[in-house]
């Protein structure tokens, strides 16, 4: 009787341990990914907040950052092509921010050495807004902006 | 499992130009369905491109990146016949890796 009770207990605790291990294994990868994704930066609503979340000071205006094949007027706010090229030496990252979107930061690109400091993608814009290209070069932040007029918003339901 | 990406990698001089078209809803979390319920955000969070095991571009995306995202970039080096790999991970933990041969 006693020994059987012990068996039940042992198998019982074994199963719990397995479940715990599985849970740990299941949770680990998503935790690691959450770390890689800068959640705080993507939830900011102003330039100051974004800079704080990225750990930088106020960016300096720069003429060495150019918008490439980016329209002045976007007919469809759901798909606005944005291209950013930086001529700043030692460009480390390029971020695209849309001022009047619910959250400013749209995308952040890390540029390793050997990769051109030029990327293009497409973003959504809720309304006509300034778009900022924020470049980190040699540890400092630089910014350029461009107004894009949107005739049809990209965040409507 | 998500739909495959379209990747094109072309050698131009001493650089390789990579163009990627991903298949993803990129739901913002701002929209509401017909019943007025908010549709939860579902979007790609991280993108990594590698060539010969070396990262040539990594990105973090918010929901403001367009549906079926497009991405283009260039890196120095690359040789015809070599492979470029692109991986994305979304906020639900789904991920997809595809590769293209440099042509």
Image: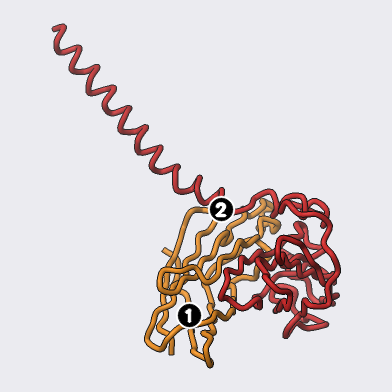
Chain colours: A red, B orange
Q: Residue B87 — which label?
A: none
Instruction: Give percent across and percent down for residue A12.
Output: 27, 22
- Residue tagged by mark 1? B7
Query: Can residue A63 be seen at all in this image of the molecule?
Result: yes
B86 up-or-down from A66: above or below: above
- Residue tagged by mark 2? A36
Task: Give the Cα distance between marks 2 and 1.
Answer: 24 Å
Task: Identify the residue at horizontal 70%, vertical 74% (top origin).
Answer: A89
Residue B13 relative to residue A49: left or right: left
| Disc 2, SS | helix
| Disc 1, SS | strand
Relative depth, front residue between A3 and B8: B8
Mark 2 or 1: the one toward you: 2
Relative depth, front residue between B53 and A88: A88
Instruction: Give percent across and percent down for residue A60.
Output: 84, 65
Query: Can residue A82 be seen at all in this image of the molecule?
Result: no
Q: Residue furthest bottom?
A: B13
A32 up-or-down from B13: above or below: above
Task: Identify the residue at horizontal 40%, vertical 38% (top origin).
Answer: A24
Q: Kindly indicate the quadrant of the structure image that contains residue A95.
A: bottom right
Instruction: Give percent across and percent down for residue A1.
Output: 13, 7
A126 up-or-down from B14: above or below: above
Relative depth, front residue between B39 and A111: A111
Relative depth, front residue between A5 and A66: A66
Instruction: Give percent across and percent down for residue B46.
Output: 55, 61
Residue B73 relative to residue B31: left or right: left
Task: Identify the residue at horizontal 80%, vertical 70% (top origin).
Answer: A131
* Label 1: chain letter: B
A101 up-or-down from A29: above or below: below
Q: Kindly indicate the quadrant of the structure image that contains residue B3.
A: bottom left
């Amino acid at each position: 009787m006693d020994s059987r009770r012990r068996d039940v207990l042992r198998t019982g605790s074994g199963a719990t341990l397995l479940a715990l291990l599985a849970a740990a294994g299941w949770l680990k990868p998503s935790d690691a990914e959450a770390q890689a994704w800068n959640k705080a930066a993507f939830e900011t609503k102003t330039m100051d907040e974004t800079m704080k979340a990225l750990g930088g000071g106020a960016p300096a205006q720069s003429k060495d950052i150019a918008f490439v094949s980016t329209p002045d007027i976007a007919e469809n706010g759901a798909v606005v092509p944005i291209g950013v090229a930086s001529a700043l030496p030692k460009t480390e990252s390029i971020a695209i921010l849309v001022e009047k979107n619910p959250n400013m930061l749209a995308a952040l690109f890390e540029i390793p050495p050997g990769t051109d400091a030029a990327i293009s993608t497409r973003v959504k814009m809720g309304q006509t807004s300034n778009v900022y290209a924020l470049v980190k070069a040699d540890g400092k932040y630089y910014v350029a902006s461009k107004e894009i007029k949107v005739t049809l918003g990209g965040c409507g339901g | 499992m998500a739909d495959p990406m379209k990747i094109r990698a072309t050698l131009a001089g001493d650089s390789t130009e990579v163009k990627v078209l991903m298949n993803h809803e990129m739901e913002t979390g701002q929209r509401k369905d017909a019943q007025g319920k908010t549709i939860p955000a579902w979007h790609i969070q991280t993108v990594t491109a590698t060539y010969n095991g070396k990262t040539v571009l990594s990105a973090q995306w918010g929901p403001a990146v367009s549906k079926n995202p497009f991405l283009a970039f260039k890196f120095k080096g690359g040789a015809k016949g070599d492979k470029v790999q692109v991986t994305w991970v979304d906020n639900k933990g789904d991920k997809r890796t595809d590769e293209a041969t440099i042509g």
